[in-house]
Amino acid sequence: MSTRIDGDLPRRPRFEVRLAETSAEIRATQRLRYEIFAGELGAAIDGGDAGLDHDQYDPFCRHLMVCEAESGRIVACTRILTGERAPGAGGFYSADEFDLAMLDSLPGRVMEIGRTCVAPEYRSGAVIATLWQGIAAYIVNHGYDYLFGCASIDLRDGGASAHAILDQIRNQHLAPPSQRVRPYIPLPAADRRATEKTRMPPLLKAYLSLGAKACGEAYWDRDFNCADVFMLLDVRDLNPRYARHFLGQSAGAVATSTETGAL
């Protein structure tokens, strides 16, 4: 008689990442976006009467989602718009906020991530890491050279924290002048200064940890009441520690993922 020792069995990860493959799954990511952006942050969103955050870019994007393995609940999502698909959408989403002329000079293929959000009770390192593993797998599998997108900083404190964070970025994380972008609506001065140490939003912190650079001053998004920082990651500049954690781990899994249609 054989005895099964549960401790010897591989544990299923708590979170799994994959691309939405059905219209129902895409709507579920749009519902999560609406809950966060409109419900939590008070953003003014067109079409919100259906409880969904959707726009002209969605049909041209791949929608990446992190699910809780046991319940199947979608707890985080982002969307991917590639350089090949962007013209059909009228351009990149970030082009509504920044002059992106510098993208034309980048020597390689580009992709944008956007509308990234995480359910409040799941804003842990594990969920953010799982989301980035999915993004990394997409980069590796499809051969992209640059990743960019906007990382938002909340302005509900009047902008004090945002300006403190932007000061840190200017001192340590600015892209070279040839890779700068210009915001169409610059962030106004704060009505007061931060009185305590500010905490970087998880998405911005993840970008910086990976080796991404901020491409200039922030955009004032009045609808979402946030400051958007345009971040650019040259895959060749990935922080080696995070490259091993994300790209190295993902590269080995890409073949299996694509065979099942997951990434």
Image (cartoon, rainbow, N blue to C red):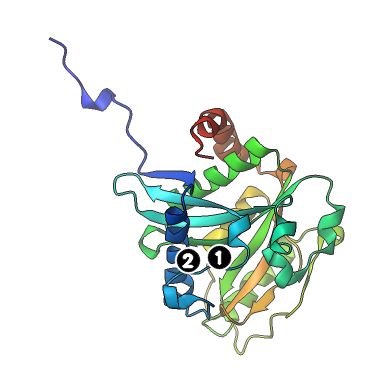
**Disc 1, disc 2: CB below 8 Å?**
no
Q: Residue at x 25, y 27 (%)?
A: 7
Tell me how many marks there are.
2
In the foreground, 63 or 129? 63
| Of labels 1 and 2, the one closer to you | 2
Q: Is residue 239 above or below residue 248?
A: below
Q: In the rendered view, does 12 fall on the left or right side of 64?
A: left
Q: Residue furthest bottom?
A: 191
In the image, which disc is placed on residue 200? Answer: 1
Q: Residue at x 50, y 39 (%)?
A: 262
In the foreground, 12 or 176? 12
In the image, which disc is placed on residue 33? Answer: 2
Q: CA distance from mark 1 to mark 2?
A: 21 Å
Q: Callout 2: helix, strand or loop?
A: helix
Q: Earlier in the sequence, mark 1 or mark 2?
A: 2
Q: Amino acid at mark 2?
A: Arg
Q: Amino acid at mark 1?
A: Met
Q: In the rendered view, does 109 fall on the left or right side of 48?
A: right
In the foreground, 87 or 71? 87
